[in-house]
Amino acid sequence: MVILVTGGAGFIGANFILDWLRVNDEPVLNLDKLTYAGNLENLTSLTGDARHVFVQGDIGDRVLLDKLLAEHRPRAIVNFAAESHVDRSIHGPEDFIQTNVVGTFHLLEAVRGHWTNLPDDEKAAFRFLHVSTDEVYGSLEVGDAPFTESTPFSPNSPYSASKASSDHLVRAYHHTYGLPMLTTNCSNNYGPHQFPEKLIPLMILNATRGKPLPIYGDGMNVRDWLYVTDHCSAIRTVLQNGRLGETYNIGGWNEMPNIEIVKTVCALLDEMRPDAAGPYTRLLTYVTDRPGHDRRYAMDASKIHQELGWKPAETFETGIRKTVRWYLDNMQWVENVASGEYRKWLDTNYAERGAQ
Ligand code: NAD
Ligand code: TYD
């Protein structure tokens, strides 16, 4: 038995593989294109471990997919592969359409061809789990009830629109062809190995370099934060026991405005790596807002709790402490990912924002 994980060299995919192989011995075939966000250094602890097989490739490559499915006959696929950063989708949406929409379509077509011809027992046991986001539901106002699985999709960024499209395709392949699909929609993740373009690692990195901490708009946009290993355990739970064709919301019941998140990171850095120049909050800088910036996301994660018994193991206090510690202990990882491409991205995204 083997599972196929796509996008397993990225932030959540790599955490998922590391956790998967910690809790069981079933091998993982990891298909990843290694874009700027994919990093095999996330998986160095698996070097020499025969349970992890890496293949560099694109989920949109039908020839490769047909070959991998025929050769390895995975019993399940977990699809993490995606372009994942909202700001990049604003500066250049094309890659998002190509991977998240067209790539997912090709992956689904390959799986349909493969699954249709499986013997009945393998067909019945097969699962395809599509990993998605709360951003497909759009934006909430203060006081609105959190998103449930029946909240209509209302994506606002090219990223969320591309993810919503892929979710629709997954739904249609279940409804039309009977493919054994599961979809998870999760809130903002944080934790080790997250690329430092996203809020929390960007703030840790900038603070340790004495650089400004750029807060978009008024800093009062709200996200619902979940520690990455809790997302991984939720995915394992849905893969094991989720009802076919269903979607499951995953969240930490932990809504916080961005400014509070960044101040928490600053306080932890003050404690763990005090700076002679003064508290890290001195670096807070309000900058021009993200265009179309969603105000608030909040997940109602009661379905996965009531049906499948899942709940997060970490609180925000324990998770954020582990996260800051991990980045401070792994500055070489950070230096290695902060390549020329990364510096170019910082220029593209921040140079013209300026302080407000
Ligand atoms: P990431 O950007 O860190 O990693 C994405 C990975 O996919 C990278 O390793 C990249 O090389 C790979 N990839 C990109 N295009 C590919 C292609 N065409 N073929 C094969 N591999 C490709 O993203 P992440 O934060 O780990 O997110 C993983 C998934 O979880 C995404 O589908 C994302 O939409 C979803 N998600 C993320 C969050 C979050 O807070 N990060 C929250 C909810 C859902
Ligand atoms: P991000 O980590 O990009 O995740 P998402 O947009 O998918 O929620 O951003 C999280 C929040 O932090 C979002 O409201 C935008 C804000 N943000 C900043 O204020 N400054 C920054 O430099 C970044 C990257 C994000």
Image: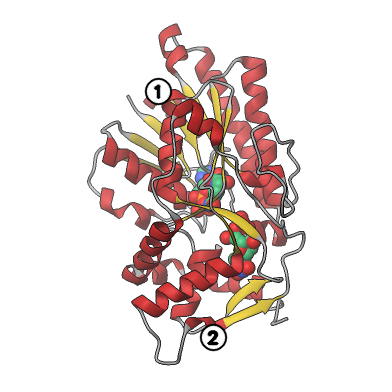
Q: Residue furthest front?
A: 143
307 with respect to 285 (left or right): left
Q: Amino acid at mark 1?
A: Arg
Give the total number of marks visible in the rendering: 2
For badge 2, the amino acid type reads Arg
Secondary structure of residue under mark 2: helix
Residue 349 horizontal/vertical position (percent): 65, 70
Residue 73: image tag: 1
Between disc 1 and disc 2, the foreground one is: 2
Dot 1 alpha-carbon crowd within 10 angstroms: few under 14, some 14 to 19, many 20 or more: some
SS at circle 1: loop
Dot 2: few (<14), some (14–19), or many (≥20) neighbours within 10 Å? few
Colour basis: secondary structure
Q: CA distance from mark 1 to mark 2?
A: 55 Å
| Residue 119, horizontal then vertical, whole percent | 44, 8
Q: Residue at x 35, y 67 (%)?
A: 325
| Quadrant hosting residue 169 | top right
Of residues 351 and 107, the one drawn nearer to the viewer in this rendering: 351
Q: Position of residue 16 (x, y in %)?
A: 40, 43
Q: Residue furthest bottom?
A: 277
Asked whether the viewer can see residue 85, the reply is: no
Name the residue tied to disc 2.
282
Left or right: residue 60 versus residue 64 is: right
- Quadrant of residue 130 within the rendered picture: top right
Q: Identify which residue is drawn at 60% across, 26% down.
A: 109
User: If the image is split into quadrants, where does the C terminus sit?
Assistant: bottom right
Residue farthest left in this picture: 48
**From the viewer's perspective, is residue 339 above or below residue 145?**
below
Mark number displayed over residue 56: none
Determine the residue positioned at 35% across, 57% down: 41
